[in-house]
Image: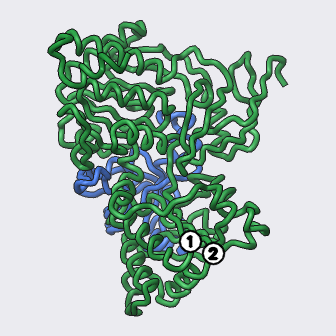
Amino acid sequence: MAENTRIVKNATCTFCGCVCDDMELTVDLDKKVITKAKNACVLGRAWFAEHQIDDRPVAMIDGKEAPLEEAIEEAAQVLVNAKFPITYGLSDTTCEAQKQAVAISDIIRGTIDTTTSVCHGPSGLAFQDIGESTSTLGEVKNRADLVIYWGGNPAESHPRHFRYSVTPKGMFIPNGKKDRTVVMIDVRKTPSAPVADILIQVKPGKDFELLWALRALVKGRKVDPQIQVMTGVPLETMTDLVERMKNCRFGVLFFGMGLTMTRGRHFNSGALLALATDLNEFTHFVAKPVRGHGNVTGADNVVSWQTGYPFGVNFSRGFPRFNPGEFTTVDTLTRGDADAALIIASDPASNFPKAAIEHLKKIPVISLDTKETSTSKLSHVAFATSTYGINTAGTVYRMDDVPIPLRPAFESPYPGDEEILFAIKKRVHELILSKCGATGATGEARVASKLML
Amino acid sequence: MTETMILIPGRSSKQGTSLNKGKLKEEYIDVTSILEMNMDDMTRLKLKDGDEVRISNEIGSAVVRCKGRKPDDLPSGVLFIAYGPPSSELMDGDTAGSGMPLSKHMQVKIEKVAA
């Protein structure tokens, strides 16, 4: 062990939405690396091992190193002079940084959206239509005797999710796995399948039909056995599942992007939420989306408590408006509406549809990221930032909406997202006020002059 | 020979660990360029592990390497690939007013790339 070693107990892994807060990190403070991450899964180990201090300029303008102050000034000028500036990303940063991003969007009358729109955004729409029968993961651990995963592969995407839902002994589940029935419903047999007691393979794109048939059976209606032709699932399998669902003590439906990203989108999520609601006529049943990035749930919470809506929010009229399809980022880019973009801790140039990426290449992009990415490479202004949870303190939300504090391992020479965003916000505010004049300022600038600084 | 199949992009462990190293690194590019395919389908299309295939739709196309999966694990006519640049090439920007592009369940044509 290196001489200058630090042990960080109860550190938090921010790689995925499980936000496991039982890490024990061994840190070589001389080399500024985490040499061991006890309790971490395969993804967490890679997260802690690979986030070292890169040798990158803290700021670049058009690919050339620039002083931080100059880059902040340039970023502020771009945002203030744009007619339809968008802010996007935010799921891999702290709530404190997310709060600054919302304020910037408000001041510049821009549009703010998060990676939720291409993740569980459809579930967000379904929550508004149907409602959510919800619980924390702690309740699942202590009470759930029937656990159903639908359209997800937690063994690979959230390897430690099972510590809440499958393996642990709970207050009312004294024998752990033996007291639970685990069901996996998916279009393919994923590496998660071995933990399942029951595996149901549905035909691709037929989740809604299967969910609706289950709802009918829960309500005691007859279902044509020909449903198997459409869904690939025999009626007897459905009937057996429905009986298990009605007769369990505490059931949970965890659902993934196999529902939200496929044909049906929010109708699929809505059907699943409605099924959970129906089952509460018979027993206690909850439904939880399995969230991806470390603080995507925080992004939903912060944008909601600051604007009233979870994602896809526009301030161009001086007050927040929510309209997925209009103000969500794939749409504002694909249609060519956006004329400047502030991208925080996200890489849309790598994972968005081609048409959206092509538009991103045409407009001035300001990016904040811990690593060089396709997005940072095409950026007009690129900031290198420290990593949340490893270098930066703050708050993140676990996928069940439980806020968790971060305990950083070592210091980074790079500023955090919050610091950069606060500086941009301050300068944007000054520019807006000088543009409009303190007395003639538009609504949001008047409010900003009183509240923001 | 060309066939139409359903492509399901998704997460995998290797995709998750390699993205921590960096999305511009060789490992990530490699992991996101492997197409899992039903072994019976591969036999029918005269493909073997490591062969290059072109997957395409009306949006774009990508050349990837195929890898066989047991018919029990991956149904005939269904393809799996880890999220990454090749899957983005095929993604439609139309979200049907939802904000979400259709990122799974894409209908694609698949054909062997001549060696």
Q: Dot 1: few (<14), some (14–19), or many (≥20) neighbours within 10 Å?
A: many
**What residue appears at the point 37 percent right and 49 percent down from the top-left corner?**
A118
Q: Nearer the viewer, residue A329 or A275?
A: A275
Residue named by callout 2: A249
**What residue appears at the point 38 percent right and 51 percent down from the top-left corner?**
B87
> Which chain is displayed in blue in the rendered image?
B
- Earlier sequence position, callout 2 versus callout 1: 2
Q: Position of residue A169 (x, y in %)?
A: 76, 62
Is there CB contact under 8 Å for labels 2 and 1? yes
- Which quadrant of the figure contains the N terminus of chain B? bottom left
Q: Position of residue A95 (x, y in %)?
A: 49, 33
**What residue appears at the point 25 percent right and 18 percent down from the top-left corner?**
A78
- Co-location on one chain, circles 2 and 1: yes
Chain A: what color? green
Which amino acid type is marked by label 2?
Arg
Q: Is residue A346 left or right of residue B108?
A: right
| Chain to which mark 2 belongs | A
Find residue A446 and name its label.
none
Looking at the image, is A60 positioned above or below residue A52? above
Residue named by callout 1: A284
| Chain to which mark 1 belongs | A
